[in-house]
Amino acid sequence: MLLEVHNVTKTYGPQKALDNVSVSVPKGQVVGLLGPNGAGKSTLMRCILGYLPTDGGAVTFDGQDVRDGGDGMKRRMGYLPEHNPLYPEMYVREFLDFIAGLHGIKGRTARDAKVEATIERVGLAPEAHKTISALSKGYRQRVGLAQAILHDPELLILDEPTSGLDPLQLKDIRTLIKSFGEERTVILSTHIMQEVEAMCDRVIMIKQGRIVTDAPLEDILAQGGLEETFNTLAG
Ligand SMILES: Nc1ncnc2c1ncn2[C@@H]1O[C@H](COP(=O)(O)OP(=O)(O)O)[C@@H](O)[C@H]1O
Ligand SMILES: [Mg+2]
């Protein structure tokens, strides 16, 4: 298994955000974390990235505890946070070059090549000469995706990557994420079931910090679809 989440519990004061969560993710899967606001999706992602200490249980990536992995492990993961914190005053290229530096990509030529290839990959070329503040929400989200994939991570974690996009932007971003999923392991979160149907191999529904469903998308569809399952759970 590439990733093992084993009996993870996380509390914030009296609030239990994750309650004994276990998930194993093999290489190559695209996993949709589906759940309402406050379900614990972002918390689970941050535990997987090793950013948050857990109150119980463990998370291992390629057999090593994520809290012990350091920069070496961080460079094998890419992360698009929920509130995609970009530097608005920076130019797109300047920002991505800065990110390449953070990932330890050295040498002017190698770095420029990496930045340009990533810009092409996410379809940012026509906007790459602008500052981030001048971009539409859809293009800003592409910059967020670009910084998450620039260093070719094995595991890509995308927290609500499509939230707030208009239908056209949504279609483009979904296509991009699907293409990442062909060669990488992806975990993405959403509270919209159609998103999972459009992009994922596997559905994990989370509610009040607990996993309530974990099944291949095809099984969910065979059982009458996500909408039905989701409504049953929500009701
Ligand atoms: N830093 C924090 N301090 C206190 N409570 C938090 C914090 N982060 C999240 N929570 C709470 O934990 C629960 C899960 O939150 P979160 O993981 O953000 O859910 P989701 O991403 O599914 O919306 C929510 O009840 C939320 O209010
Ligand atoms: Mg969240």
Image: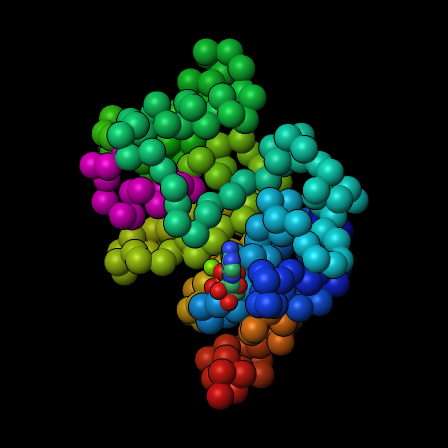
Residue 50: percent from left, percent from top: 64, 45
Can residue 166 be seen by looking at this rendering? yes
The answer to whether residue 136 is magenta is yes
177 or 61, nearer to the observer: 61
Residue at image x 49%, y 21%?
Answer: 101
Foreground pick, 140 / 28: 140
Residue under the image location 75 percent in, 44 percent down: 65
Picture residue at 42% right of the left edge, 31% below the top: 118
18 displayed left or right of 159: right
From this viewpoint, which residue is outermost toward the top?
108
Q: Is residue 192 left or right of residue 65?
A: left
- Relative to 150, residue 169 above or below: below
* Rendered residue at 53%/31% (across/down): 151
Residue 210 x, y percent position in the rendering: 63, 71
166 left or right of 3 in image: left
What x and y, as percent, mark residue 121? 41, 36
Residue numbers of the magenta segment: 132-145
